[in-house]
Image (cartoon, grey):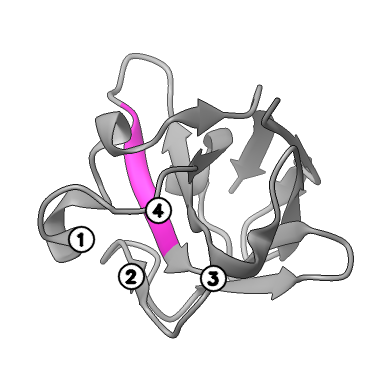
Amino acid sequence: QVQLLESGGDSVQARASLRLSCRASGFTLNHAYMAWFRQAPGKEREGVAYAYTGGRSRFYADSVQGRFSLSIDNNANTFYLQMNDLKPEDTAMYYCAARSTLQFPGDVKYTWRDPDSYTDWGQGTQVTVSS
């Protein structure tokens, strides 16, 4: 059974940094499609960052490019989102997502942003950034 457990969310001031963790169980991160999404109150779920852990494929939303970065610890089976220079508009519930099947649907350059492309989700971790 696939499980994703996020942690690391917090309430911080603008320009602070946070690192979110997504610990996976039920599958290994060696070759997996992983992503972070976020959802603010009253807004749709938004793709933040994506990685295929078996290669170099990485995508980031324009709003976080240059500030957020992904990393993977295969020994800990954990997927991270490093968030620097946080802004109030980054305030949201952050979710880890995974696709546990062999092939990613459609052209990943576009479909990584679609929540329906993923088969498994964590429960979320709250990030609040104050000005």
Q: CA distance from mark 2 to mark 4?
A: 8 Å
The numbered mark, 1 or 2, whose residue comes first in the sequence reads 2
What amino acid does circle 2 point to? Phe
* Badge nearest the viewer, 3 or 4: 3
Image quarter in which the N terminus is found: top right
Q: Position of residue 47 (x, y in %)?
A: 34, 46
Q: How many marks?
A: 4
Q: Quadrant of residue 33?
A: bottom left
Q: Residue at x 88, y 62 (%)?
A: 76
Q: Which residue is mark 1?
A: 108
Circles 3 and 2 in contact, beta carbons < 8 Å: no
The disc placed on residue 48 is 4
Q: Earlier in the sequence, mark 3 or mark 2?
A: 3
User: Is residue 113 inside the magenta stretch?
Assistant: no
- Answer few, some or many: residues within 10 Å of disc 4's Cα (few below 14, many 20 plus, some between 14 and 19): many
Q: How crowded is the residue under tag 2: few (<14 C-alpha within 10 Å), some, or many (20+)?
A: many
Residue receiving disc 2: 59
Left or right, 45 with reference to 32: left
In-image side of 114 versus 45 (left or right)? left
Q: Which mark is residue 53?
A: 3
State how far apart marks 3 and 2 are (Cα): 12 Å
Pair 3/2: label in front: 3
Q: Residues within 10 Å of mark 3 (few under 14, many from 20)?
A: some
Farthest-out residue, right: 76
Q: Dot 1 surroundings within 10 Å: few (below 14), some, or many (20 or more)? A: some
